[in-house]
């Protein structure tokens, strides 16, 4: 594993030096963003399937990095299932409670510091103290803690050492740090010209008038990319409802009842929900996301 990491570092340094030498030799300016396909911008996104794939290879994390970071945060909670996973649940709820992307970007540096500090603290707990110095009080007390309680609190212990696997914590720290950089970069005019902006639409708009704010021509099976757009914009809502229904029926407990109620509520109104004002639509999804975060935290606690 160490040789593989060393090989990747050497490969990355070689490519970086080669690109730097090539640009200096040909008097080329480096792009304002770390991209692979240099001449693919936001204007090429709707020109076909191949330009679309190249665009998302360049700017996929720029567009969906926040969602990827939140998915990894939920994965960390599910993999750990201990006291620190409960802290991650609280941090996730605190971040999502800001709702708007700009407000989330303001608290994101604190979230990155929280993730980094928590990871360092857990590393120190794994190291522990030398056995020759003293014993841990939760083992030598008159009423020692149960081994499962020690494991859940991730306390250092000579009899049962904490699991030192931080792979998912490292991925969360990596993605959250990259997303912090995205929040900084998306305020630069050069980056927004190249990759597009991440500005949210107004919550006071009427869905029937969206077409006058979309800079792309209407699509109707003109190309394979248009077929993908038709699937995403027409059927993705129903795909999400299928996932909510599967989540509510996979296990039989009180928490799954909320998913079933949400699924049948959306199915009752069908596609007419998407024709409501934006503020009303987002309020429904905010309640669903809030309930999901609550279930994640409660399952971990229980």
Image: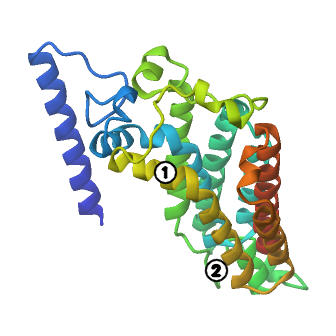
| Screen quadrant of the N terminus | bottom left
* Residue 177 or residue 125, whichever sits in front: 177
Disc 1 marks which residue?
A: 230
| Screen quadrant of the C terminus | bottom right
Residue 232 image position (x, y, % from top left): 52, 53
| Mark number displayed over residue 294 | none
* Residue 250 seen from this side: yes
* Residue 28 or residue 260, whichever sits in front: 260
Q: Is 80 above or below relative to 185?
A: below
Q: Residues within 10 Å of mark 2 (few under 14, many from 20)?
A: few
Residue 204 image position (x, y, % from top left): 79, 29
Q: Image point 62% across, 52% down: which residue? A: 70
Question: Which numbered disc, 2 or 1, marks the residue that appears first in the sequence?
Answer: 2
| Mark number displayed over residue 158 | 2
Q: Is residue 56 left or right of residue 126?
A: left
Query: Distance of mark 2 from mark 1, alpha carbons?
Result: 59 Å
Q: Secondary structure at mark 1?
A: helix
Residue 238 image position (x, y, % from top left): 63, 63
Tell me the quarter of the picture where residue 147 sits: bottom right
* Residue 302 seen from this side: no
* Residue 133 or residue 225, whichever sits in front: 225
Q: Is residue 122 left or right of residue 166?
A: right
Q: Image point 23% across, 62% down: which residue? A: 3
The figure's colour scheme reads rainbow
Q: Is 292 above or below relative to 52?
A: below
């Amino acid at each position: 594993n160490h040789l593989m990491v060393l090989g990747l570092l050497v490969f990355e340094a070689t490519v970086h030096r080669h690109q730097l030498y090539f640009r200096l030799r040909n008097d080329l300016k480096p792009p304002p963003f770390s991209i692979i396909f240099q001449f693919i911008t936001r204007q090429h996104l709707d020109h076909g399937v191949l330009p679309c794939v190249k665009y998302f290879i360049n700017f996929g994390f720029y567009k969906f990095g926040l969602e990827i970071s939140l998915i990894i945060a939920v994965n960390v909670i599910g993999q750990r299932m201990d006291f620190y996973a409960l802290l991650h649940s609280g941090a996730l709820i605190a971040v999502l409670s800001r709702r708007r992307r700009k407000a989330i970007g303001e608290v994101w540096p604190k979230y990155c510091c929280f993730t980094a500090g928590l990871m360092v603290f857990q590393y120190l707990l794994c190291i522990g103290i030398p056995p020759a110095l003293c014993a841990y009080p939760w083992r030598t007390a008159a009423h020692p803690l149960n081994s499962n309680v020690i494991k859940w609190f991730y306390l250092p212990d000579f009899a049962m050492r904490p699991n030192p696997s931080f792979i998912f914590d490292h991925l969360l720290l990596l993605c959250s740090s990259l997303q912090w950089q995205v929040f900084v970069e998306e305020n630069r005019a050069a980056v927004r010209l190249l990759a597009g902006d991440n500005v949210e639409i107004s919550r006071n708009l009427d869905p029937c008038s969206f077409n006058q704010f979309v800079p792309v021509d209407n699509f109707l099976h003109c190309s394979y990319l248009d077929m993908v757009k038709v699937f995403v914009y027409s059927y993705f809502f129903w795909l999400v409802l299928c996932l909510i229904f599967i989540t509510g029926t996979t296990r039989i407990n009180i928490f799954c009842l909320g998913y079933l109620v949400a699924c049948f509520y959306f199915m009752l109104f069908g596609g007419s929900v998407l024709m409501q004002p934006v503020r009303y639509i987002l309020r429904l999804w905010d309640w669903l996301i809030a309930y999901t975060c609550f279930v994640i935290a409660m399952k971990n606690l229980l």
